[in-house]
Amino acid sequence: MKLFLTPNGRIDQPTYWRAVGILFLASAAISVLGTFVHGFFGLFTFAVIWCWIAIHAKRFHDNGKSGAHMLWLILVAGVANSVLGNVLPALFGFDAAAYSQEISESMSSSPDFARMMELINDAQKATIVPNILTTLITTGILGGIMSLFKTDPNDNQYGPGPGGANDVFV
């Protein structure tokens, strides 16, 4: 659990990719559970975001760089999610303009909150596959960037080199 809970220390590339796989599956499961079971599951997204930050900071540390470089990755992830989040749902047949108009109409005369919640739930169901695909593509982009950073074989200010105490997948 230390791998996901603290940004301190270092992880090598294979450990990073195992952690990415686990976090992607957790993100997808939270999306599905939040959509089809109960919206409360969406709150777990915040915990997963912290885990993403922790493993990326450790990966930067492994290259001798500050975990503050995560800010650049957050920017890249935000741009990728924004672009993909607007393009992919349309490719899967979701009409955001019609959805927005329907929401407006349900709220214009006399607010029908039950209808609005039904529309939101329908939109979540209609966009679950594009949303998971957006997460997968964004994860691939960030993983590609992180692949550019090679492991520093020596001890550095962030911890011991490969084979040290932090090199274990825990």
Image (spheres, rainbow, N blue to C red):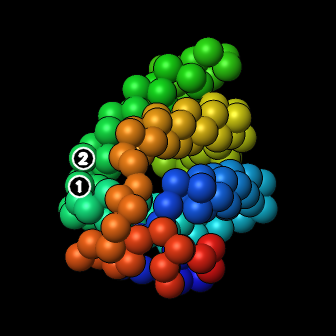
Under circle 2, the secondary element is helix
Amino acid at pointer 2: Trp
Residue 50 location, x and y as percent? 43, 69
Q: Is residue 165 above or below residue 95?
A: below
> Contact, CB < 8 Å: mark 1 with mark 2?
yes
The numbered mark at residue 115 is none
Q: Along the line of sight, which residue is nearer the eye, 143 or 52?
A: 143
Which residue is tagged 1? 69
The numbered mark at residue 72 is 2
Residue 142 location, x and y as percent? 44, 42
Amino acid at pointer 1: His
Determine crowd level at label 1: few under 14, some 14-19, many 20+ residues with C-alpha closer than 10 A: few
Q: Is residue 128 above or below residue 91?
A: below
Determine crowd level at label 2: few under 14, some 14-19, many 20+ residues with C-alpha closer than 10 A: few
Q: Along the line of sight, which residue is nearer the eye, 40 or 7?
A: 7
Q: CA distance from mark 1 to mark 2?
A: 6 Å
Res 71 visible: yes
Q: Along the line of sight, which residue is nearer the eye, 111 or 99?
A: 99
Residue at x 24% of width, y 47% of height: 72
Residue 104 location, x and y as percent? 45, 33
Residue at x 53% of width, y 37% of height: 140
Res 131 visible: no
Q: Is residue 32 above or below residue 48?
A: above
Q: Along the line of sight, which residue is nearer the eye, 63 or 83?
A: 63
Residue at x 49% of width, y 48% of height: 111
